[in-house]
Image (spheres, grey):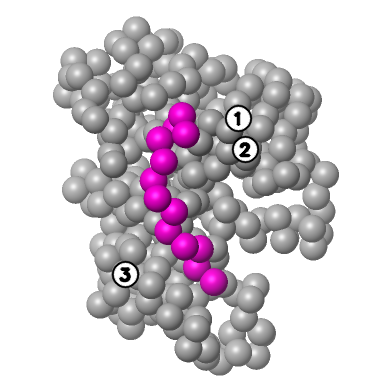
């Protein structure tokens, strides 16, 4: 069943809610290389958290650790009540069913219609013969159409995904996550391949999915504009360390400098129009 829409609460009202993610002194790395140097973070249920930072600061590695794809080196990590590093086989599969993942490159099957791409989000709940025949029950159709309504694509159900724009594809991917009925959605730079208008629409959609279904979201973003506009809370990473953690209104010019310190790639520089010079717009309701 699609969860009921909870009323939107402020972050402070949620402070005593159960944490979806709790990391203490979390160290992550690859081989000899340490990528995250002792991260402490607690993410309460329903929060829309955006992680920003230059390329290579460890954003993707953090998301991958949350779904058990990168092992914990040291420190502790609890996600949805489990330590992802200890899960294997079917327990890891069941754990990942509770987590939606949104990729920069969408990961849809282009030759299939929107309907089947969205339905694949509930594949674990569709018996294999039925999945092969692509037959869904009335209840499954209802969930798929409801998810497509939330992402604003209810009139594209039968269109092939490769006929859609990038922004529409990403919204199909969000609908696929919604029917999965996850507790947590991880989105790794979901808008970096999109034009600004589509990017805005995708972020609004992700925000709506979080609000309507009470889903906790951790979203990595390259630039600050969307972070300021949509996040409840922003975590800024620089070289694998948290250099900022707070609501968008606290992201001051000096905090922005700390996040992008030593960043030599001009692509990563804060957008001059929306970075340091402009005051923070109010966070999205
Ligand atoms: P971001 O997402 O912020 O760009 P990443 O988490 O992808 O950062 O990468 C952090 C650091 O880890 C980078 O220096 C990157 O080169 C390195 N890294 C990422 N993935 C791997 C991997 N599979 N093997 C080895 N090093 C990696
Ligand atoms: Mg990345």
Position of residue 126 measured from the top left corner of the image (x, y, whole percent): 62, 81
Q: Earlier in the sequence, mark 1 or mark 3?
A: 1
Q: Nearer the viewer, residue 17 or 24?
A: 17
Question: Taking 44 as reference, is 199 above or below it?
Answer: below
Residue denoted by label 2:
19
Q: Nearer the viewer, residue 243 or 179?
A: 179
Please report the bounds of the magenta region as a residue range: 1-13
Q: Looking at the image, do the residues carrying marks 1 and 2 touch, with CB atoms under 8 Å apart? A: yes
Q: Is residue 8 magenta?
A: yes
Does dot 2 land on a helix, a strand or a loop?
strand
Query: Dot 1, crowdedness within 10 Å: few (<14), some or many (≥20)?
Result: some
Q: Is residue 177 visible?
A: yes
Query: Dot 3, crowdedness within 10 Å: few (<14), some or many (≥20)?
Result: few
Q: Looking at the image, do the residues carrying marks 1 and 3 touch, with CB atoms under 8 Å apart? A: no
Residue denoted by label 1:
42
Residue denoted by label 3:
149
Q: Is residue 239 magenta?
A: no
Q: Nearer the viewer, residue 132 or 8?
A: 8
Residue under the image location 32 percent in, 12 percent down: 252
Position of residue 145 measured from the top left corner of the image (x, y, whole percent): 38, 76
């Amino acid at each position: 069943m699609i969860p009921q829409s909870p009323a939107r609460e402020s972050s402070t009202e949620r402070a005593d809610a159960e944490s979806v993610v709790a990391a203490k002194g979390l160290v992550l790395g690859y081989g000899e290389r340490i990528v995250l140097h002792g991260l402490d973070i607690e993410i309460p249920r329903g929060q829309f958290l955006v992680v920003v930072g230059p390329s290579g600061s460890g954003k993707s590695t953090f998301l991958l650790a949350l779904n058990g794809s990168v092992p914990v080196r040291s420190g502790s990590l609890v996600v949805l009540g489990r330590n992802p590093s200890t899960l294997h086989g079917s327990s890891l599969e069941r754990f990942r069913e509770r987590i939606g993942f949104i990729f920069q490159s969408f990961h849809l099957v282009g030759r299939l219609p929107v309907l089947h791409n969205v339905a694949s989000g509930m594949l674990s709940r569709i018996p294999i013969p039925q999945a092969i025949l692509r037959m869904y029950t009335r209840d499954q159709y209802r969930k798929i159409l409801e998810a497509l309504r939330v992402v604003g694509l209810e009139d594209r159900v039968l269109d092939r995904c490769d006929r859609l724009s990038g922004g529409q594809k990403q919204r199909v991917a969000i609908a696929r996550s919604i029917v999965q009925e996850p507790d947590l959605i991880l989105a790794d730079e979901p808008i970096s391949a999109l034009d600004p208008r589509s990017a805005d629409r995708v972020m609004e959609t992700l925000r709506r999915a979080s609000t309507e279904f009470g889903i906790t979201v951790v979203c990595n973003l390259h630039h600050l504009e969307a972070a300021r506009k949509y996040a409840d809370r922003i975590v800024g990473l620089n070289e694998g360390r948290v250099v900022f953690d707070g609501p968008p209104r606290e992201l001051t010019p000096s905090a922005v400098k700390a996040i992008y310190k030593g960043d030599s790639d001009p692509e990563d520089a804060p957008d001059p129009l929306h970075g340091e010079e402009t005051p923070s717009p109010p966070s999205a309701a």
